[in-house]
Image: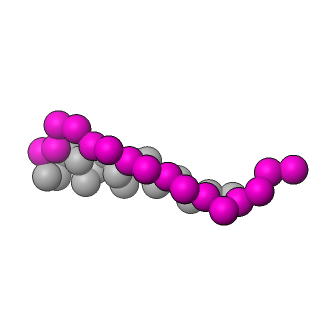
Amino acid sequence: MKPRYLPAVIDVMKFYDWRRIIYIYDSDEVYN
């Protein structure tokens, strides 16, 4: 299970007035 981080990322973008963001996600989780 992954935490719900998207609302926090959006809040940070709004706080710093970022127009664009590059997000790279890497996970070692294996799906069966």
**In the image, 18: left or right of 7?**
left
Q: Where's residue 32, x and y in %?
A: 87, 50
Find the magenta span and give its range.
17-32
**In the image, 13: left or right of 8?**
left
Q: Is residue 20 magenta?
A: yes
Front-most of residues 13 and 26: 26
**Farthest-out residue, left:** 17
**Farthest-out residue, top:** 19
Q: Where's residue 16, x and y in %?
A: 14, 52
**Quadrant of the image for the N terminus?**
bottom right
Q: Where's residue 7, x and y in %?
A: 40, 48
> Would you place residue 12 above or below residue 14 in this image?
below
Q: Write down the quadrant of residue 19 in the picture.
A: top left
**In the image, 26: left or right of 28?**
left
Q: Residue at x 77, y 56 (%)?
A: 30
> Would you place residue 20 above or below residue 32 in this image?
above
Q: Residue at x 34, y 51 (%)?
A: 9
Q: Residue at x 25, y 54 (%)?
A: 12
Q: Where's residue 13, x and y in %?
A: 23, 47
**Farthest-out residue, bottom:** 28
Q: Residue at x 16, y 44 (%)?
A: 18
Dominant SS type (magenta): loop
Coloration mode: one colour
**In the image, 2: left or right of 11?**
right
Q: Is residue 29 magenta?
A: yes
